[in-house]
Image (cartoon, coloured by chain):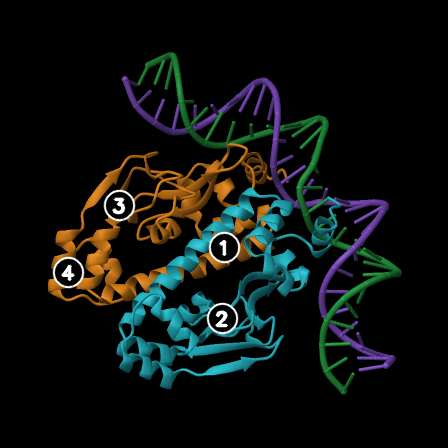
Chain colours: A orange, B cyan, C green, D purple
Amino acid sequence: MHHELIEHIQKFVSLDDSEIEMMESTLQKSNIKKKTHVLQEGQICNSMYFIVKGCMRQYIINPKGTEQTLQFGVENWWITDYLSYHNHSPSHFYIQAVENSEVIALDKNTLESLLVQIPKLEKYFRVVAQKAFGAAQMRIKFLFTMSAEERYNHFKNQQPDFVQRVPQYMLASYLDFSAEFMSKIRAGKV
Amino acid sequence: MHHELIEHIQKFVSLDDSEIEMMESTLQKSNIKKKTHVLQEGQICNSMYFIVKGCMRQYIINPKGTEQTLQFGVENWWITDYLSYHNHSPSHFYIQAVENSEVIALDKNTLESLLVQIPKLEKYFRVVAQKAFGAAQMRIKFLFTMSAEERYNHFKNQQPDFVQRVPQYMLASYLDFSAEFMSKIRAGKV
DNA sequence: TCAAAAACTTGAACTACTTCAAGAAATTCA
DNA sequence: TGAATTTCTTGAAGTAGTTCAAGTTTTTGA
């Protein structure tokens, strides 16, 4: 049994033994304790994070001082700020572990050299990014067309287990309504 | 002077003469008349569109029957439904020319074979998708943190020319408020 | 195991927007 | 050019959510 990341890559491109060996020797897992940040607003994002186990989130602090989650990541997802990563610009986001998590942090230099040595990986990262963008488009569609209650029910139907996994106020902000309103939706008081 | 797409690709990867020649002979521009659709809801999206000239948009028709624009594309942007494209699933979106436009339609088979013959293109499409995803994240941030008026002013500051280029009701829906409210914002009646 | 911290709940007052309806202005193209 | 179409505007009434403040419940970790 290989590295979870290698299993994931092999869903999109096939690696030969020497490539797998190179990946295995280059990559290492690290443990991120719940609530630890791997990126803070204003920092330049220099790594991509593959989530082996646990849950991470990307969030902002809005002008009122409230956290708003823009993205959750669970097992087999990548999380990063691509804009900061590509443009070397200060990030607008925080990235934080929601649960104790196991991630593979892939920093820019390491990734660049892996991509040169194993060009097939370009395709993997291309497809991952294209699918992520497609998912972001669907997310915007749901935000535009559904009421708060519909967004909650839709999410709960799609991801029944995940709803249990994170504090409800984080999920509320991800679905773009207040924690108080979430409470009322769940109590059937809307 | 090469194809605009080739110029764009060369911003990210460098192509040699034979590769440029292959691209030139494979790709062709087509003209899309204003209001023509290149994708309708329910169809499977089988192409990516590179906008050489003009303006395209991706939109939905919401349950109330109103169009809501999710994405505009102008010169040097790609527009497509990546989810439908990758999963062979019916699209949730319409893609339509907002102005008479010149595009390069790259269908799946052609793209696949180009990617095999010119593997460098993988990198180009990877970076394009990663940047697009980063931009989508920023868009969600703005939708979450700014009022309708702030979103309008922010957009107008970032893209002063573009505001003139499309009907205001399309821009209103892109910024997630009603056409009537847009009218009031512009008249200073909020 | 229990004190502190984090998360959730409730109701009342408020507000940033939407909806509707109708007319006016601008644009299109035969 | 001018009739048809598309786009924009306005005000009045309505509503899906927010905000605030305070209390309750649940979870955490020394």
Mark found first going from the N terminus, 3 or 4: 4
- The residue lying at 41 percent from left, 74 percent from top is B5
Task: State left or right for residue C14 relative to residue B160.
Answer: right
Categorize mark 4 by other alpha carbons within 10 Å: few (<14), some (14-19), many (20+).
Answer: some
Comparing D25 with B84, the one in front is B84
Task: State left or right for residue A161 relative to residue D29.
Answer: right
User: Mark 4 highlights which residue?
Assistant: A20
* Amino acid found under the numbered disc labelled 2: Pro
Q: CA distance from mark 3 to mark 4?
A: 18 Å
Q: Residue A58 sits in which quadrant?
A: top left
Mark 2 or 1, closer to the camera: 1
- The residue lying at 14 percent from left, 54 percent from top is A24
Co-location on one chain, circles 1 and 3: yes
* Amino acid found under the numbered disc labelled 1: Arg
Co-location on one chain, circles 2 and 1: no
Task: State left or right for residue B159 relative to residue B167.
Answer: left
Q: CA distance from mark 2 to mark 4?
A: 36 Å
Categorize mark 3 by other alpha carbons within 10 Å: few (<14), some (14-19), many (20+).
Answer: many
User: Mark 1 highlights which residue?
Assistant: A139
Q: Is residue B33 above or below residue A5?
A: below
The C terminus of chain B appears in which quarter of the rendering? Answer: top right
Numbered disc 1: secondary structure = helix
Mark 2 or 3, closer to the camera: 3
Mark 2 or 4, closer to the camera: 4
Categorize mark 2 by other alpha carbons within 10 Å: few (<14), some (14-19), many (20+).
Answer: some
- The residue lying at 39 percent from left, 62 percent from top is B129
Please report contact status of discs 2 and 4: CB closer than 8 Å, yes or no.
Answer: no
Q: Position of residue A51 (x, y in %)?
A: 29, 48
Numbered disc 3: secondary structure = strand
Disc assigned to residue B90 = 2
Q: Position of residue A37 (x, y in %)?
A: 33, 37
